[in-house]
Image: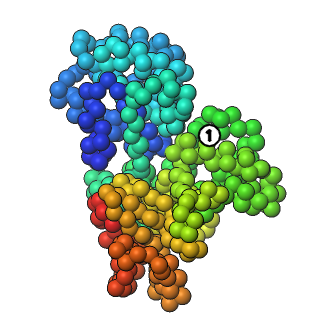
Amino acid sequence: MIYREKYLSEIRGFYHSDLIKIITGVRRCGKSFVLEQIMTELSKETDNFVYLDFDDRIATADIETWKDIVHYIQSNRKEGLCYVFLDEVQEIGGWASACRALRRENCSVFITGSNSKLLAKEFTKELSGRYVSFRIRPFIFLELQEYARQLGRECSVSDYLIWGGFPKRLEFSTLLEQKRYLSDLNETIVANDLINRYKIRKQSEFRKVINFILISNSRIYSAKSISDHMTGNGINVTPNTVQKWISYLENAYIIDEVPRYSKKAKKELEQSRKIYDSDVSMNSIRCKDNRFDLTHNMENIVYNELVYRGFTITVFDNNGKEIDFLAEKGGQRTYVQVAYSVVEEKTWKREFEAFSGIPVYDRKVIITNDDMDYSTSAVEHIRLIDFLQNESGI
């Protein structure tokens, strides 16, 4: 597995802190590997650490309550500062009580979870600010390429556009095996992290709404518009229910909701937002007859890459003309349009005219999969491959 220095550099300053280190993200994005890399770094200093993986309920079958966690740690630690790693700890009721108890016993506690139940109000209230949180995401393109090289494989931009960045998929040699893995992972996420956790009764309706949302990535939505669409297809679900189910997806780090900002109104447009999948494979495994949605997936991976690089993202409404991203970082603003291709004049005109009226001192960028340079005096054109191979900026 590759060394994920980007995340480690954020966490490293808290290794010895008594603050609880919460590492979150969608299932199978690599949280456990980050945890292992932290343990590897700490093992150069000490052997006083204890690791429990609650996803492996055979190995942890005897641990049923938070008191069992505390007892196990106390029985297996050494004197001095002990480093405690609790993987998928949300499986144990009262986990926050265990964390509070351990930090009082000279422990540096690291926990992971695939569900933002770890950061829900009732738990953050219990922890009373005694934590720091870090979100891990599936591989970006450069990470995927590096891991592919380790495995003696290659990974193209087209492969990334369709099948995304879940690390383990690269360990399977055939596309059929990768698709089976991604489909099974999706079922685990939908069934375990959503249906079972939230005790969904209308499972058929829930699955159809979730499928619609995940295959509609990089699009503007409102709970009412989704409700109307589903009702028109014979599935009666209210806007309130749709919004609740969307919150479940976001809580499990399956999607991000990105606000829209209106230049004219000078405020966020609260009634509609854009949805981006945490990994574009969640769109592709739902496509039929290999008719993959490369256009919207491309916008989605640009979003994922920008967030990874530390940009704050909003969707910008430029007097009725949408600009995909207003990316802000370090006091700098960059307006970003994403289009699969602008070869056709109609598309070129639509995409470039979206920047009309944007101040000349703000950077304006369009990212496409075209090889030809379409830069103008006002707008910089960046090829997708060049953007993906950039490590930090745009």
> Measured along the vertical axis of the image, is residue 206 above or below residue 232?
above
Figure quadrant of the C terminus = bottom left
The total number of labels drawn is 1
Figure quadrant of the N terminus = top left
- Is any part of residue 63 visible from this angle? no
- Local secondary structure at mark 1: helix
**Badge 1 local density, few (<14 within 10 Å), some, or many (20+)?**
many
Give coordinates of residue 119: x percent, y percent. 50, 34
Q: In the image as oriented, which residue stretches furthest toward the bottom?
A: 345
Please name the residue that numbered disc 1 is placed on.
194
Q: Residue at x 45, y 58 (%)?
A: 313
Task: Identify which residue, 354 or 191, lies in the foreground.
Answer: 354
> Measured along the vertical axis of the image, is residue 41 above or below residue 204?
above
- Is any part of residue 130 visible from this angle? yes
Give coordinates of residue 268: x percent, y percent. 56, 58
For this view, does 222 lie left or right of residue 338?
right
Dividing the picture into quadrants, the one containing residue 121 is: top right
For this view, does 23 lie left or right of residue 213?
left
Q: Residue at x 47, y 18 (%)?
A: 97
Q: How is the image coloured?
A: rainbow
For this view, does 210 lie left or right of residue 299?
right
Give coordinates of residue 310: x percent, y percent. 35, 54
Q: Residue at x 59, y 74 (%)?
A: 320
Task: Identify which residue, 88 or 319, lies in the foreground.
Answer: 319
> Measured along the vertical axis of the image, is residue 263 above or below residue 50?
below
Task: Identify which residue, 57 or 75, lies in the foreground.
Answer: 75
Give coordinates of residue 349: x percent, y percent. 50, 86
> Measured along the vertical axis of the image, is residue 385 above or below residue 49?
below
**Amino acid at the residue labelled 1:** Leu
Q: Residue at x 42, y 18 (%)?
A: 100
